[in-house]
Image (tube, rainbow, N blue to C red):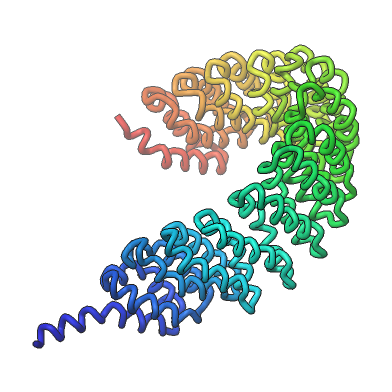
Amino acid sequence: MAASEGTADDSLYPIAVLIDELRNEDVQLRLNSIKKLSTISLALGVERTRSELIPFLTDTIYDEDEVLLALAEQLGAFTPLVGGPEYVHCLLPPLESLATVEETVVRDKAVESLRKVCEEHSPEHLETHFLPLVKRLAVGDWFTSRTSACGLFSVAYPRLSVATKAELRSHFRSLCQDDTPMVRRAAAGKLGEFARVVEVEYLKTDLIPMFVTLAQDEQDSVRLLAVEACVSMAGLLPQEDTELLVMPTLRQAAEDKSWRVRYMVADRFIDLQKAVGPDITKNDLVSAFQSLLKDVEAEVRAAAAGKVRDFCQNVDPSVQEAVIMNNVLPCVKELVSDGNQHVKSALAGVIMGLSPILGKDNTVTHLLPLFLSQLKDECPEVRLNIISNLDCVNEVIGIQQLSQSLLPAIVELAEDSKWRVRLAIIEYMPLLAGQLGVDFFNQSLSKLCMTWLVDHVYAIREAATNNLRKLVEKFGPEWAAQNVLPKINAMSRDGNYLHRMTCLACINVVGEVCGRELTTKTLLPTVLAMANDNVPNVRFNVAKTLQIIGPHIDKESLHTQVKGVLDRLNDDSDTDVKYFASEALIAMTPLFAAP
């Protein structure tokens, strides 16, 4: 008897602990207990989970939002723990309560879990248990329940009977006409999703009128979400129905008084273009796209400008060139000199993509002047976007034409009197090198990179040094041996001690990527020779350089050459030289000790 009482106590223990923890004042403790629900459920077994745990959770949904969020997430994966799909309807009461709370994040997670649970229901249980839940939420007194209901129609609808489907469509219509803007917004956001599961005849008779109503709503937050639904509906209807039922509303949206609605049209324009097809694009969307490119709001122009390339690519090939030349290009020319840098930057990121579409002659005549203008733009992002996409133009017009047109502009910027402009070009140089290839780089840009190393501004010399490392990484040690190292060695004999210091800075970064052989045979002798420099700053930088490149020098040279030079510098008459030489000797002790 005592043994059976002990077993009963043991079986009650998990639920008792959960109750205690969920009533604890510490939020973190309550949160941890919710995250352990699956473990507690396993300890209780499926029957007690259904009869005790789920009712208890349903009755205690009054807590901090983070606890409720964790609970909503846990319940979405609870189907196996209540006995599988046959008993999954047990999870509906707590999730229904969670779907009505005030906090949006909790409601959204509850709806997400309800959608998962819906998939587990059999058709019979769907009508018996899930459908009443959707109806209750759809006619709830609080807007919170009605907004949650909007997300459940599309998952329940496909497996319901004909009569029940009609009822659901009626409920959704009511939500689209709800007095509360938040509910209409939720309905507009889910309309496209619902349209994808509704039969075509009801799409035309029931959902299109809902779409038109939402697209004319007094709240712009509702109207802009109707644009999303427009994409789905246009893709589901035959072309003649799209032209008749959807396009009038889309034309209104493209000219809406609210910039946020026009922005949404611009942002989803390529999806709309693909959904309506080439004929409607040619007849309707070209003029709408022009309007968006000329919009008074910079945000709308930027969104449309970023779609220029994709829009032009998707135009019917038979009219593609004419549309670009007559309709798009005049707008693009205005945007190149737009007063807003975000608009120019968005355009610069895609404008090069017009070259393959327009071909060589049109690129040279019409696009190159625009590229040149953007390459000289005061906004760094605009310049970067042009340089990043030079390969598109290179493939169309060839390196020769490119060098004659754009390269002079790059060189001009590289020699600009304002050091910040020069700095910007240095940062783009590795990217440019990758775009143009090693041969062209050696011929046209290599000299520039070496000239920056002796610039009178330290920031330029420092950036040029880091630039060398990136170039060596891109083109390899052999390229460095032929094109970079001889010039670095020559700098070690320059009359200006600042240039000799830059030489050591170059060796610091290049030595790490050139490989052990090149560093030992070519760079090390240069550094060792500079240990005799008459300027103390150069000598103590020699000590620092030897410490940096030490791991990349072969063992024999370390013992026979490097250590002796550092010992000599350690006895230097200058205090700073002695200090850095001593630091280098200490740091390199493991290298010298290695066999």
Query: Relative to 152, is 195 on the left or the right?
Result: right
Query: Relative to 437, is 319 on the left or the right?
Result: right
Task: Give the residue displayed 64% in from the left and 30% down from the top.
Answer: 467
In the image shown, does 384 or 317 lie closer to the viewer? 317
Task: Give the residue displayed 74% in from the left and 17% down from the top.
Answer: 396
Q: Is residue 143 above or below residue 327?
A: below
In the image shown, does 98 or 456 lie closer to the viewer? 98
- Residue 149 location in percent, x, y? 59, 67
- Residue 372 location in percent, x, y? 84, 27
In the image shown, does 235 or 163 lie closer to the viewer? 163
Of the 4 image quadrants, the one containing the N terminus is bottom left
- Residue 7 location in percent, x, y? 16, 80
Of the 4 image quadrants, the one containing the C terminus is top left
Q: Is residue 278 visible?
A: yes
Task: Give the residue displayed 80% in from the left and 25% down from the top.
Answer: 320
- Residue 522 location in percent, x, y? 52, 18
Q: Which quarter of the figure has residue 283? A: top right
Total numbered badges shown on the rendered structure: 0
In the image shown, does 407 or 274 lie closer to the viewer? 274
Query: Relative to 17, is 196 on the left or the right?
Result: right
Task: Give the residue displayed 68% in from the left and 18% down from the top.
Answer: 441
Q: Is residue 500 visible?
A: no
Q: Is residue 478 above or below residue 378?
A: above
